[in-house]
Image (cartoon, rainbow, N blue to C red):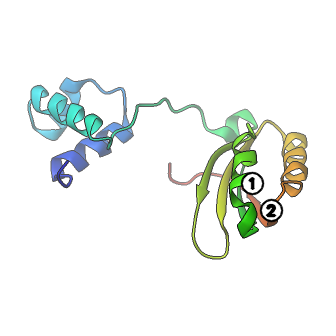
Amino acid sequence: MERLSDLDRSLISELRRDGRAPVSALAERLSVSRATVTKRIDKLTAAGIIVGFSVRVRDPQETGEIRAISFIELLGRATSTAIAELRGYPEITALHTTNGAWDLVAEISCNDLQEFDALLTRLRGVKGLRNSETSLLLSSVVR
């Protein structure tokens, strides 16, 4: 697909705000026809730009959920093994490779502090994990 147009970017922005918005409402907000919106969504989906639609749930602070970010340094030879093990941890909701001092960034979600503490203990036992630094997320100011 060619580069994203201003319309494509605006459409994606509207879908991020409300992924369940009716095509007619999107068309009205973007000042285009419903057919144009449908065509652009289909094209963006076919090109792999839009990879799915999801539901947002209540903020974790309201449910007592513990969220954290963990920065992880790995031993070079054990990278694949460590990533494979970390992928199996249900508390790790996303795992990203990165550059700089850390090799991975893990997004973590636990039901309570006891579960969080147990996860940290398990993380320390991952073969090939050299170092980690984990920070609790206190509140989200932009989502």
User: CB of mark 1 within 8 Å of CB of mark 2?
Assistant: yes
Three-letter code for the amino acid on which mark 1 is drawn? Ala
* Mark toward the start of the polypeptide (1 vs 2): 1
Identify the residue at horizontal 11%, vertical 32% (top origin).
36
Q: Dot 2 lies on which element?
A: strand
Task: Report which residue position mark 2 lands on.
Answer: 129
Q: Is residue 76 above or below residue 62?
A: below
Three-letter code for the amino acid on which mark 2 is drawn? Leu
Q: Nearest the camera: 81 or 36?
A: 81
- Residue 74 x %, y %: 74, 66
Identify the residue at horizontal 22%, vertical 31% (top origin).
42
Visible residue check, residue 16 = yes
79 sits left or right of 33 in the view: right
Q: Is residue 18 above or below residue 102?
A: above
Mark 1 burial class by Cα count in 10 Å: few <14, some 14-19, many 20+: some
Q: Which mark is residue 105?
A: none
Task: Report which residue position mark 1 lands on.
Answer: 82
Q: Nearest the camera: 124 or 24?
A: 124
